[in-house]
Image (spheres, rainbow, N blue to C red):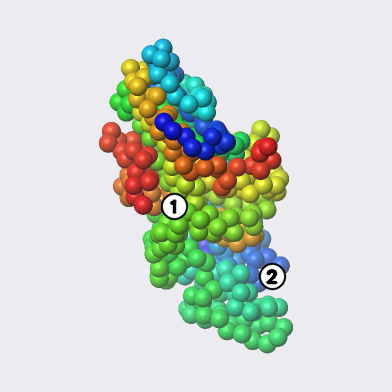
Amino acid sequence: MSIENKSFRPKIVAFCCNWCSYAGADLAGSSRLSYPADVKIIRVPCSCRVNPMFILRAFEKGADGVIMCGCHPGDCHYSTGNYYARRRMTLLFSMLDYIGVENGRTRVEWVSAAEGVKFSDTMNSFVEKIHSLGENVRLGDLRCRN
Amino acid sequence: MQELINRAKELLDNGTVARVLGWKAGDLPYDPEPAYFETAESLKDFVYNGFCGANLSKYMIEASKLEGKTLVCLKPCDTYSFNQLIKEHRVDREKAYIIGVGCKGKLDIEKIRNQGVKGIESIEGAEITDEADTLKIQTIYGERSVAYADAMLERCHVCKGKEHKIFDEQIGESKETKDGERFDEVSRIEKLSPEEKFAFFQKELSKCIRCNACRNVCPACSCRKCVFDSNKFDSSQKANVDSFEEKMFHIIRAFHVAGRCTDCGECSRVCPQGIPLHLFNRKFIKDIDELYGEYQAGDDTDSKAPLTNYTFDDAEPSIVGKRG
């Protein structure tokens, strides 16, 4: 991965579900797979725990991209959590797109506990995408900027 | 209107209802306000005319806790909200005696003012028994006449229909007012570039003074404890200090009622700044219709709301980018 603009380090928040994606991140680590340190993982009990406000709040506090990872549909530890999360996030992302926030800044990816490679690939490609979009200037509280 | 008052008196007198929930004349000809009437004498202030846009179904949440039945006047669009509140167990159907009142489209005083009508003294032609063709407005500068359709609220131009979804009896005539499609404006905005969309919403939302009127009037916003009142939420009870806060407020406000919003248009009607808040709600409704099948909140009292439901093959969130 080549990143030309070295001066810009994006802030990326990743919400990972405890049962699949967080374990997937763990596997990526123990398999010595790398992903950029710009990704800050927040562990949540289930992808369904992610309130739309979390995503907006992350942007408000200066995140340049927010990604949510959960178990594959059908594999939720709580049976159906990620089905609800899927509908919620689809509507929220569509709304963000509607008010003019670039669509690439938000993403949902299903990563199981066995998919360390997928986790690392996903994070690498997401960081690259945010690099190409640049700093998030549309959403964000100016007071939180340096 | 006299028929409505007579019937209300009759029901108050024979003890069927303990109070009447309707509209009472305000100080000016165009500002009737929601009110309770507990005696037959007090009904002399009762009005029902073209300016009675207020949706009374939300008042039934509190009225359901009172002793005895409440007679409530609901317009066709208000009955959707009432149905939705029944579904959410917020109102007690047994405590309500619903009179479905006719509707010929409700008026927006701002639209009249925007046509250069100033110094209004009286308005003729807004009574529910009138034909709803033209308004004769007496102003301090002389008489003006305005076409009824040009003074109607935006929501009446895209009316859901004049059929009451729930009622005990119906009084009064209705007149079809629909002359547009409700998603036209949403589709227009969707086609803009991200910069144009952002500029559009920036312009509209920067007018927001965080008065919370849109939240307070919304029949779907009926939580006892509201997230916006929490002092942990940055923008609780204060005017925006940053452009982001009002966006967050309005996205979350619309999101909290997504799938439950009946598109009654009260938020836009009460906004003192004239922000087209229905554009947020309609975007969610449009997405739900397109992705999860057509759904009209308040159509019935037992179907599952789209966000409390799922199917195994729902669209993935990445569809947002692909739809273009």
Q: Nearer the viewer, mark 1 or mark 2?
A: 1
Q: Is residue A11 visible?
A: yes
In the rendered image, the vertical position of residue B213 relative to residue A32, given as above or below: below
Image point (68%, 87%), residue name? B142
Quarter of the image with the N terminus of chain B is: bottom right
Q: Is residue A82 visible?
A: no
Q: Label 1 neighbourhood size at 10 Å, few (<14), some (14-19), many (20+)?
A: many
In the rendered image, the vertical position of residue A27 relative to residue B135, given as above or below: above
- Mark 1 to mark 2: distance in Å? 35 Å
Q: Which mark is residue B320?
A: none
Q: In the depicted view, which residue is nearer to us: B70 or A28? A: A28
Image point (68%, 53%), residue name? B209
Q: Amino acid at mark 2?
A: Leu
Q: Which mark is residue B28?
A: 2
The answer to which of marks 1 and 2 sits earlier in the sequence is: 2
Q: Are the residues at dot 1 and dot 2 in contact (C-beta closer than 8 Å)? A: no
Q: Secondary structure at mark 2?
A: loop
Q: Quadrant of residue B208?
A: bottom right
Question: Mark 2 falls within which chain?
Answer: B
Residue B247 x, y percent position in the rendering: 58, 48
**Dot 1 corresponds to which residue?**
B283
